[in-house]
Image (tube, rainbow, N blue to C red):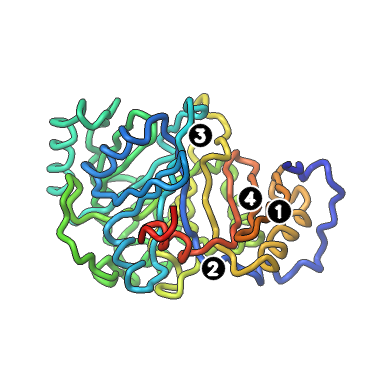
Amino acid sequence: MAVTQSSMEQSHDDSLAPLAETKPLKMLSGTLVSTDLDRARHFYEEAFGFECVRHGDDHLLIRDRYAKAAMDNGSDDFIVLDVRQVSEIVTPHRMCNHWGFDVDSSDEVDRIYEAFKERQEELGLIKIMPITKAHGAHGAHGFYSIDADQNWWEVQYVVHGYDNAGIFSRGDSMDRAITPGGTLTSKAKRVKPKSAPDCILGDGDLTHGTMKAIEIERERGLLRDVLGLNTVQYIPQAILFAGNSDATGVANFAVVSLGIPVPNSVPMHSDVRWVLNVADVADLRAIRDRALASGAQYGEITVGEIQESSSEASCLIGDAEGNWFELTTNGDKEYQSIFNGSSV
Ligand SMILES: [Fe+2]
C-alpha cells in the first residue's frame, strides 16, 4: 500500500547532509507492458535481435546482444527489459517515454528505416516517424517507431560522438549544439557479443530510455540526493541519470529525463518503472528512509511499503512527475538464471 508523502509529517532537516551515502548497485532493468507477448516477441526479435525468455505466466524478459555479452562475462554493464502482459494499455507512451538504440552511422539509420517501412505491417508498427537529421539540441540522426503496444523505439546515430559515459565525463553542460570535446568513449570498450547480428538493427545497442521531468532541477535532486544515482546535465532541457557500475562508473545504459511539456500526458502506471538493484534490505531501508525524510523538497512523492518474500525485498517510489522507481534486492544473478533457463 502506497503512502503519500505529503500526508506525512515532514522531518527533513540539515542532518540529512551529506545525502545519498547509500547508493544502488546498478540500474538493473526497465519495465514495459504489452497486450500480446507473442506478437511483441516477434517484433523484438526480428527488429532488434532481443533474446526473449518467458518467465512466470505473464512476463517476458529481454536483453540485447551487448547485455548478453556483458552478463556472460560477469560485467555489470547491462540493462534488461521486463515486459508484462496486460489486458489494456492504460498509459499510452509519447515521445518522452522511449527506448533508444545507437548504431554506427547515418547510413545504418537510413537502412534500418527502410527495412522498418518495408516490414511495417508484419512487425506490427502502428507508426514510423520520418528521419530527423542531426541538428539542434538532439545532435543525432534517427527516427522513432511506435509498436502495437504504443511503446516508442528510437534508432539513432549520435553525430556529436559522445556516448553516455562520454556525456558523464563531459560534466554538466548547457551546450545545445553538443560540440564535440572532452573525453569521448564508445561501445568499442564494451564486451563484444560473440554472435553476429541477426536482425534489422544490426550491430546496435540499447543505450537509453527516457522519461518526462518538467521540473528538471527538482527531479535531479530526487534522483541524486534520495535515490543515489549519478546525474549530469546534458542540455538545458535534459539530464541523464544512471546506476553505478563497477565496469564504467556509470552504467552504459542511461535514462534521459526530458523537460519537454507534452500535451495530454498522464502519469505513468507503476507497471512502467526503473528497477534499481540495492545490496541488501538495510540499503533499501536507508534509501526509502531518505525518501520519507525529504518532505516536499522534491515535490509530492509516493513511498511504498517494503514488500518482503523469502527471496526478495522491494519497494516502489513514485516521483512528482508520474514516474516510478522500484528498489529491489534482486540482482543480476536472478536475471542471469532466468536467461540460463535455471529458473522459470
Ligand atoms: Fe532518445
Residue at disc 3, secondary structure: loop
Residue topped by disc 3? 261
Circle nearer the viewer, 1 or 4: 1
Q: Amino acid at mark 3?
A: Pro
Callouts 3 and 1 close, C-beta under 8 Å: no
Mark-to-mark CA distance, 2 and 4: 23 Å
Q: Amino acid at mark 4?
A: Arg
Residue at the spot 23% in from the left edge and 32% down from the top edge:
123
Residue at the spot 27% in from the left edge and 65% down from the top edge:
187
Mark-to-mark CA distance, 2 and 3: 32 Å
In the rendered view, would you say 174 is above or below 301?
below
Q: Residue 308 location in percent, x, y?
A: 68, 55
Residue at disc 1, secondary structure: loop
Residue at disc 4, secondary structure: helix
Q: Amino acid at mark 1?
A: Ile
Residue topped by disc 1? 306
Mark-to-mark CA distance, 3 and 1: 33 Å
Mark-to-mark CA distance, 4 and 3: 15 Å
Q: Mark 2 or mark 3: which comes first in sequence? A: 2
Residue topped by disc 4? 218
Q: With 6 as the anchor, is 206 left or right in this view?
A: left
Callouts 1 and 4 close, C-beta under 8 Å: no
Foreground pick, 225 / 245: 245
Residue at the spot 85% in from the left edge and 56% down from the top edge:
11
Q: Mark 1 or mark 4: which comes first in sequence? A: 4
Q: How crowded is the residue under tag 4: few (<14 C-alpha within 10 Å), some, or many (20+)?
A: some
Q: Residue 289 location in percent, x, y?
A: 75, 59
Q: How crowded is the residue under tag 1: few (<14 C-alpha within 10 Å), some, or many (20+)?
A: some
Residue topped by disc 2? 25
Q: With 133 as the anchor, is 314 left or right in this view?
A: right
Q: How crowded is the residue under tag 2: few (<14 C-alpha within 10 Å), some, or many (20+)?
A: many
